[in-house]
Image (cartoon, grey):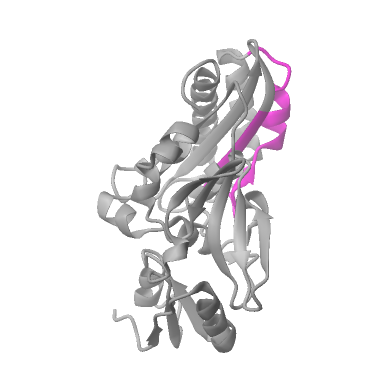
């Protein structure tokens, strides 16, 4: 199928992009890498009259250290994020998560801002950013800026907090505390471009060999990135170890809200979540015990 007919705009600044978005409203769509939007246009899932390309706005690209953490520009290609020394040193779970996504060509085009803005339940980066305590920076047509906790950004499948004309400008990750670690685990039916059947990211902070804090987020098994609150609570105060992590995995599987589709049944997804959770917790604990965070 063809992409359909639309007008293409190339704003040079964030303010210009927001103004165009406000002017055209819901008849417009923002284009970053295009790995989601172009598929939607070609399949007929979405039809728009105006497409606003963000690739020419330099301030939206790059990975940079900021006070208290790291800032990733919204149109930074996923491949560049995964290979950033800042990300590999401070947030290796994000690097490893991106490395499992699609193929190299898609990672060269796809952006983290697009991964968030599309609001697709199987997107891989939002659960990782949620577990890291990240925030999403937004700019509105009137120039006002706001930050939204990553865990509150996606409201429902393909529905986010974004208002007409508003765009994601950056993802901000706080510096991680000592003796903390995170790991992203993903299961798909094949390597390469396959979407996740289920994914889990686990974050833990240890005091000696005891779990002091834990965060677990699941992808592709619910309408939004799901927090496994009961599984998290079960870990606090417990010794880090196989039995503890297996029990948390069982709780996370019960908290998942999977559907049955061509990639797997709901029950299969729950079983996968249990395994991935235990695996992610074990890897996160190893990092917290002295490896790279």
Q: Quadrant of residue 211?
A: top right
Quadrant the N terminus occupies: bottom left
Which residue is drawn at the image coordinates 64% and 18% (left, top)? 206
Please identify the residue farthest to the left as the structure is shown. 105
Q: Front-most of 38 and 207? A: 207
Question: Against 255, is 233 above or below?
Answer: above
* x and y, in percent, of residue 83 in the image: 35, 42
Which residue is drawn at the image coordinates 41% and 56% (left, top)? 76
* x and y, in percent, of residue 208 in the image: 65, 10
Relative to 125, is 157 on the left or the right?
Answer: right
Which residue is drawn at the image coordinates 46% and 55% (left, top)? 112
* x and y, in percent, of residue 142 in the image: 66, 78
Relative to 129, is 152 on the left or the right?
Answer: right
Say if the magenta span includes residue 221: yes
Say if the magenta span includes residue 144: no
* x and y, in percent, of residue 100 in the image: 36, 42
Residue 124 visible from this viewpoint: no
Residue 196 visible from this viewpoint: yes
Q: Front-most of 91 and 58? A: 58
Q: Front-most of 282 and 173? A: 173
Question: Against 199, is 235 above or below?
Answer: above
Relative to 224, is 85 on the left or the right?
Answer: left
Question: Against 26, is 198 above or below?
Answer: above
Write the start and end of the magenta stretch as one range.
214-239
Count of numbered circles in the view: 0
């Amino acid at each position: 199928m063809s992409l359909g007919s639309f007008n293409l705009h190339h704003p040079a600044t964030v303010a210009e992009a927001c103004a165009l978005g406000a002017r055209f409203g819901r008849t417009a769509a923002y284009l970053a890498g295009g790995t989601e939007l172009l598929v939607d246009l070609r399949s007929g899932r979405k039809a728009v009259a105006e497409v606003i390309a963000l690739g020419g706005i330099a301030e939206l690209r790059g990975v940079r250290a900021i006070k208290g953490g790291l800032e990733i520009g919204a149109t930074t290609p996923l491949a560049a994020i995964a290979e950033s020394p800042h990300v590999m040193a401070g947030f290796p779970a994000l690097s490893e998560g991106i490395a499992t996504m699609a193929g190299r060509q898609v990672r060269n085009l796809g952006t983290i801002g697009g991964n968030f803005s599309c609001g697709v339940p199987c997107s891989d980066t939002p659960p990782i950013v949620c577990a890291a305590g990240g925030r999403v920076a937004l700019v509105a047509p009137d120039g006002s800026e706001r930050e939204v906790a990553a865990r509150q950004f996606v409201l429902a499948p393909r529905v986010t907090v974004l208002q007409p004309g508003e765009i994601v400008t950056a993802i901000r990750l706080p510096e991680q505390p000592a003796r903390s670690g995170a790991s992203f685990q993903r299961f798909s039916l094949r390597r390469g471009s396959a979407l996740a059947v289920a994914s889990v990211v686990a974050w833990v902070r240890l005091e000696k060999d005891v779990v002091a804090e834990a965060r677990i987020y699941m992808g592709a098994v619910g309408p939004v990135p799901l927090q496994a609150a009961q599984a998290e609570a079960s870990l606090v105060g417990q010794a880090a170890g196989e039995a503890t992590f297996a029990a948390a995995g069982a709780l996370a599987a019960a908290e998942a809200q999977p559907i049955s589709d061509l990639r797997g049944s709901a029950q299969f997804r729950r079983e996968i979540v249990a395994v991935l959770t235990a695996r992610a917790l074990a890897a996160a604990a190893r990092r917290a015990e002295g490896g790279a965070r």
